[in-house]
């Protein structure tokens, strides 16, 4: 339905500068992603001015700000049960602060930048840093339970790294040396031998590739009865599906290179009503598409069962963020050309806007609302209008 509707689906309803320019450090980009607390109408987002902000979702006004010793380019994690926000900083620490007022609860030093979202399972936080180290931390005390480390790859690495993921009683992590591993969540022991995704690329090239990194946080889906798939992407080795139980490779698409983020998009099956205004029409089966973001080769839609390409959008020059589902579509940021709404079925652009500097922060979405921050620290809130029947706009359906 999206591609048959005129542009104008995105409406900027909140726009305000957040980053204090005099305090900003590092490159002229804002990275990370916002975290939404829909119950209390709060948005938590980091900034290059070394602060984590709590903003009101309706107007973007500041509730509180927490200062760290480094830029905050990490997606926070909000724990609604404890009303606590966990987030990382480039000062090497993981912070826990009270969501109500930003009071510090604990600070855990990891020794390297923390730029990926932590994962919370029961009372344990799993967090990775930029030095290929994965930690398990008590969520209340901030005490370490275990850690694992892999030696970084020799040579050059792509900026960024993967985050941890939890699924069916295992913690999955990918590393800069091109490997992916599953760990026991209780003690960090390996559940299967590390899988080297860059090995095939090395054999084809006849030499060690320059970029071995696996920077994508693993995502999961049922491939077939009894087989749980783990999707990851090597920068040079393409997108891979692994068996979550054994690590066996199920398929690989080595044409989709330069991938930094993956998303499994789902469209539920639709059975039309027997009566009423929406009666009739065809049955629509469930649809699943694995969406891969690459600054070098574009945005790809892949069949998660086979890895076959369904569509590809060659995005403009510059970087691109992870895609985020919103109102049946995808919202994605580009570092030079603004924020865009895309159709997940065909990869076509629906709408977009630019504030003049582009977006490196991955958008966050809830319902038909999305939030992002531009490279110059301008926070925006966007409402998305999904396509609806003309009969539903402005008046009620006529009585039968």
Image: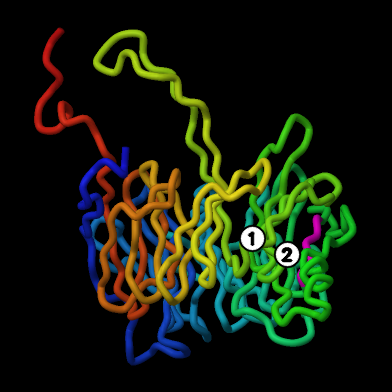
Q: Is residue 125 visible?
A: no
In the rendered view, tell whether residue 209 sits above or below residue 45.
below
Residue 224 coordinates in the image, percent (x, y): 73, 33
Task: Give the main secondary structure, helix, strand or loop, of the magenta stretch.
Answer: strand
In the rendered view, tell whether residue 152 sits above or below residue 220.
below
In the rendered view, tell whether residue 379 sits above or below residue 400.
below
Residue hosting label 2 = 174
Residue hosting label 1 = 217
How is the model colour-coded?
rainbow
Residue 321 falls within the magenta-colored stretch: no
Marks 2 and 1 close (CB-CB < 8 Å): yes
Work out which quarter of the rendered image holds the C terminus and state it.
top left
Residue at the image point whose x is 37% and y is 78% from the top: 375
Q: Is residue 128 visible?
A: yes
State the extent of the magenta-drawn residues as a range.
178-182
Residue at the image point whose x is 36% and y is 9% from the top: 274
SS of the residue under disc 1: loop
Residue 143 coordinates in the image, percent (x, y): 72, 67
Work out which quarter of the rendered image holds the N terminus and state it.
top left
Is 324 positioned to the left or the right of 384 in the image? right
Residue 31 coordinates in the image, percent (x, y): 46, 74
Tell me if mark 2 has few (under 14), some (14-19) or many (20+) residues whose alpha carbon lies within 10 angstroms of its own: many
Tell me if mark 1 has few (under 14), some (14-19) or many (20+) residues whose alpha carbon lies within 10 angstroms of its own: many
């Amino acid at each position: 339905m999206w591609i048959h509707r005129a542009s104008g689906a995105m409406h900027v309803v909140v726009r305000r500068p957040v980053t204090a320019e005099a305090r900003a450090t590092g490159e002229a980009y804002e990275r990370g992603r916002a975290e939404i607390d829909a119950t209390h109408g709060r948005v938590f987002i980091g900034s290059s001015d070394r602060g984590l902000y709590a903003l009101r979702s309706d107007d973007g006004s500041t509730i509180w700000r927490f200062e760290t010793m480094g830029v905050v380019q990490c997606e926070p994690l909000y724990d609604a049960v404890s009303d606590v926000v966990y987030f990382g900083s480039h000062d090497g620490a993981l912070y826990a602060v009270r969501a109500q007022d930003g009071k510090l609860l604990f600070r855990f030093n990891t020794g390297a930048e923390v730029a990926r979202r932590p994962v919370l399972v029961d009372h344990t936080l799993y967090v990775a840093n930029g030095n290929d180290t994965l930690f398990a931390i008590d969520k209340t005390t901030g005490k370490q339970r275990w850690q694992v480390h892999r030696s970084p790859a020799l040579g050059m690495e792509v900026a960024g790294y993967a985050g941890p993921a939890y699924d069916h009683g295992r913690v999955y992590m990918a590393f800069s040396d091109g490997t992916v591993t599953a760990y026991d969540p209780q003690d960090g022991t390996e559940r299967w031998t590390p899988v080297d995704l860059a090995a095939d690329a090395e054999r084809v090239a006849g030499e060690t590739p320059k970029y071995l990194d696996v920077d994508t946080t693993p995502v999961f889906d049922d491939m077939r009865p009894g087989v749980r798939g783990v999707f990851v992407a090597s920068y040079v080795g393409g997108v891979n599906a692994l068996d979550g139980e054994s690590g066996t490779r199920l398929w690989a698409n080595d044409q989709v290179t330069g991938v930094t983020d993956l998303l499994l998009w789902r469209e539920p099956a639709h059975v039309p009503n027997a009566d009423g205004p929406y009666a009739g029409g065809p049955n629509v089966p469930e649809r699943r598409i694995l969406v891969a973001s690459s600054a070098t080769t574009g945005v790809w839609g892949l069949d998660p069962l086979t890895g076959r390409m369904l569509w590809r959008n060659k995005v403009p020059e510059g970087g691109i963020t992870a895609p985020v589902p919103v109102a049946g579509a995808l919202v994605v940021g580009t570092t030079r050309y603004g924020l865009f709404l895309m159709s997940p079925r065909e990869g076509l652009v629906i709408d977009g806007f630019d504030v003049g500097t582009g977006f490196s922060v991955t958008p966050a979405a809830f319902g038909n609302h999305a939030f992002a921050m531009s490279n110059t620290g301008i926070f925006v809130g966007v409402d998305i209008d999904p396509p609806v029947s003309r009969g539903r706009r402005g008046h009620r359906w006529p009585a039968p």
